[in-house]
Image (cartoon, rainbow, N blue to C red):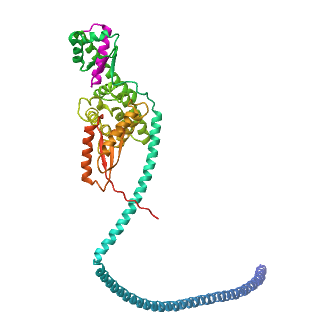
Amino acid sequence: MLPIVLAAVGGTALGGAVAFLVWRMVVGRRIRAAQIEVEALLTDAQTKHKEAILEAKEEGLKIKSQAESEIRERRAELQRHEKRISQKEENLDKKSDAFERREYGLLAKEKEAEDLHNHLQELKQKQIQQLELISRISSDEAKELLIKAVEDEVREDVSRRIREIEVQLKQEADERAREILSQAIQRCATDVVSESTVSVVPLPSDEMKGRLIGREGRNIRALENATGVDLIIDDTPEAVTISGFDPVRREIARIALEKLILDGRIHPARIEEMVATARNEVETTIQGEGEQATHEVGVPGLQPELIKLLGHLKYRFSYGQNVLRHSIEVAHLAGMIASELGAKVALAKKAGLLHDIGKAVDFQVEGPHAKIGADLVKQWDKSAEVASAVAEHHGETNSTSILGFIISAADAISGGRPGARRETLEHYLKRLEALESVANSFTGVEKSYAIQAGREIRIMVKPAEIDDLAALRLTRDIVKKIEETLQYPGQIKVTVIRETRAVDYAK
């Protein structure tokens, strides 16, 4: 058993020894392999280390080279800057030297100029003294004379220029005015005069004259007392003339007389009855004519008193022209002119319709009809512009508004158109010639012009013979002589003009 155990132990030991030898051989191989690998890694690491060192040296050399290159470039640039700065310093030094030399030169010239100025002042003062001795006037007086001469020359030039502008503006204004007036005249068509200021009543026979007179003239006296007119029964066959300063009374008398003739019963009681009936008819006609005139012109809202006064103008005539038709015509013309000028058309029409309203009562109130009409408009219409235009339409006031000019132009067109008035050309010319001859009869009168259809006369006097005070005396003397020697309707404005003209020509 022991040998078996020994054999087993010997076998185990032998197997262990064999296994140990085998393990030792395997481990030795691994160690050698590891050593070889380690040596290879060491060799590779050394190689890479050498390469890294070489690369680092190369990179360091490269950086060093770039740094040295940049340093050289910056050094070169600094050198260039230093060179430019040094050049600029040299230039500044040169300029500074030049400026110093110029300053010295200017100071010297300034000193010379100052010395020369002082010398000239001394010479000027000596010359002034010599001139004062020669002319016997001081320098201040000479300055005043020089300034006055310059002012006179400038004033003369300005006056000439103003005169040229005035002439040019007057020509343009005249052309524009002619255009506006011609358009207004063309657009307004009215009838010529067909009524008269004399009322004539036809009779069926001359026997009726005796019946109108009545026993011992009682019928004619009753008719005259009831109407306030005069009956002219003369040799005119089959006609009776009614005369009276009041056109309304004259119309009442005409209607009453016609009714009496148709009725045939003529006695004082019947006369009073017919006159009352005729008065009512005339008042109705007056109211209707006034209202119709306002509607025709297009002027609503007038006071009843003004409408009634307008109706009275139906029986009022001026040189044969019916004043109511004339007023309506002036209203239309004024509206057309105002529309062309950009003025207030409604006010122009109202002022044109009312411009002769004073003629309805001018035989009852003292004064020119324009002033009377303006007072009536102020009383009833409360329109200051219309009242002013009514007062100004004959140029009898000191100032004239644009509305006054419009009404004056429209009134002149209406009264001056062919066929508007019955006054003959011969009589009209004689009246103007008589007015001018009265003015020309005075000493010192150079020329005279009758304008505004004889309502105004302008007199040019000789300035060498008539001074300002004499012009005032001449105006009063001419007015007095016109009142004593001439017969005329309304009033005449006398204007004396004294002027001195200075004319020069540029050559």
Residue 264 among those drawn in magenta: yes
Percent position of residue 7, x then y? 79, 81
| Pick the front one: 312 or 463 | 463
| Pick the front one: 294 or 365 | 365
Percent position of residue 313, x then y? 32, 27
| Pick the front one: 37 or 240 | 240
Q: Which residues fall within the magenta stretch? A: 240-266
Percent position of residue 389, x then y? 32, 39
| Pick the front one: 276 or 94 | 276
Q: Majority secondary structure of the magenta segment?
A: helix
Work out whether 168 lies above or below 317.
Answer: below
The quarter of the rendered structure image containing the N terminus is bottom right
Work out whether 327 lies above or below 90.
Answer: above
Answer yes or no: is residue 448 visible.
Answer: yes
Residue 395 among those drawn in magenta: no
4 left or right, relative to 426: right
In which quarter of the view is residue 465 placed?
Answer: bottom left
